Image (spheres, grey):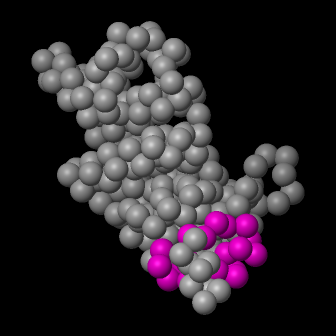
């Protein structure tokens, strides 16, 4: 479990906290969506969950390991995979195959097992035809699939997606969310989906809404989206159905 206890974070040089006294938990195998307007603290929270940012006060524990403990960061980042909005930040190898194999090599996986797992991932994410292509020439959807495939190949306990689908077409968004949802069930991965799309949040078992660095709602998506006026007042999108029900 990832436990967030009274977490506050302030960026250097800022006079205001990006996160203020946040308490939350994220279970292995669970599916939690996080929404909020720009500047609400979504990405800051995401980066605190795997130790990219360290709490100004409070703490984040990943299966009991404190993200403020530098000696625990390697293990924390093995357990908590991170996908960013821009896949170019994560792709460094000369070919798609090498990108997938890179992390496994660092973990010391033997070549036969590595080949087996890379082939399975190429097929799962529909990347077989571009296996020898440079990541830099892939389409946006292919790059994001590769970034997610590379992280999931390392079998993290938790996967944080920081608006990883926001630049993709509706078709690619749906495709990636479907793959992630299947893998979550199959491998019991805890998913934390930072998103601006209500349609994606509806797929989660729980929805956290942030506003000005604080938790505004933390409940099932159905319950959260019943508060249409409150959500619209803080700049959070709501499903069309919820708007229609409010009007009726």
Q: Quadrant of the N terminus?
A: bottom left
Up/down of 197 relative to 202, above or below: above
Q: Position of residue 82 (x, y in %)?
A: 47, 42
Identify the residue at the far bottom of this view. Answer: 248
Q: Quadrant of the C terminus?
A: bottom right
Q: Position of residue 71 (x, y in %)?
A: 45, 40
Of residues 130 and 7, the one nearer the viewer is 130
Residue at x-position 24% and y-position 56%: 185
Residue at x-position 45% and y-position 41%: 172
Up/down of 203 relative to 95, above or below: below
Residue at x-position 30% and y-position 60%: 29
Question: Is residue 226 within the magenta segment?
Answer: yes
Q: Quadrant of residue 16?
A: bottom right
Of residues 12 and 238, the one nearer the viewer is 238
Residue at x-position 71% and y-position 74%: 232
Q: Quadrant of residue 88?
A: top right
State left or right for residue 33 relative to residue 29: right
Is residue 99 in view?
A: yes
State left or right for residue 227 relative to residue 106: right
Of residues 60 and 114, the one nearer the viewer is 114
Residues in magenta, as a range:
221-239
Up/down of 31 relative to 128, above or below: below
Q: Position of residue 241 (x, y in %)?
A: 54, 75
Give the tally of numbered discs: 0
């Amino acid at each position: 479990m990832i436990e967030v206890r009274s977490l506050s974070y302030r960026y250097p040089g800022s006079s205001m906290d990006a996160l203020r006294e946040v308490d939350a938990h994220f279970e292995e195998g669970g599916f939690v969506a996080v929404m909020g307007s720009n500047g609400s603290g979504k990405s800051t929270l995401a980066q605190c969950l795997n130790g990219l940012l360290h709490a100004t006060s409070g703490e984040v524990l990943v299966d009991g390991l404190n993200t403020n403990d530098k000696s625990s960061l390697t293990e924390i980042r093995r357990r908590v995979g991170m996908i960013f909005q821009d896949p170019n930040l994560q792709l460094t190898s000369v070919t798609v195959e090498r990108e997938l194999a890179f992390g496994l090599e660092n973990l010391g996986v033997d070549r036969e097992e590595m080949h087996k797992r890379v082939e399975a991932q190429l097929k799962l994410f529909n990347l077989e035809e571009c296996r020898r292509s440079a990541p830099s020439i892939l389409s946006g959807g292919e790059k994001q699939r590769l970034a997610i495939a590379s992280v999931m190949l390392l079998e993290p306990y938790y996967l944080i997606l920081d608006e990883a689908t926001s630049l993709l077409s509706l078709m690619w968004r749906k495709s990636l969310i479907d793959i992630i949802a299947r893998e979550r069930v199959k491998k019991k991965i805890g998913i934390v989906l930072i998103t601006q799309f209500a349609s994606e949040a509806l797929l989660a078992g729980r929805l956290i809404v942030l506003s000005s660095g604080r938790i505004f709602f933390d409940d099932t998506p159905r319950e959260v989206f019943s508060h249409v006026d409150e959500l619209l007042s803080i700049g959070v999108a709501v499903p069309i159905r919820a708007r229609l029900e409010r009007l009726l």
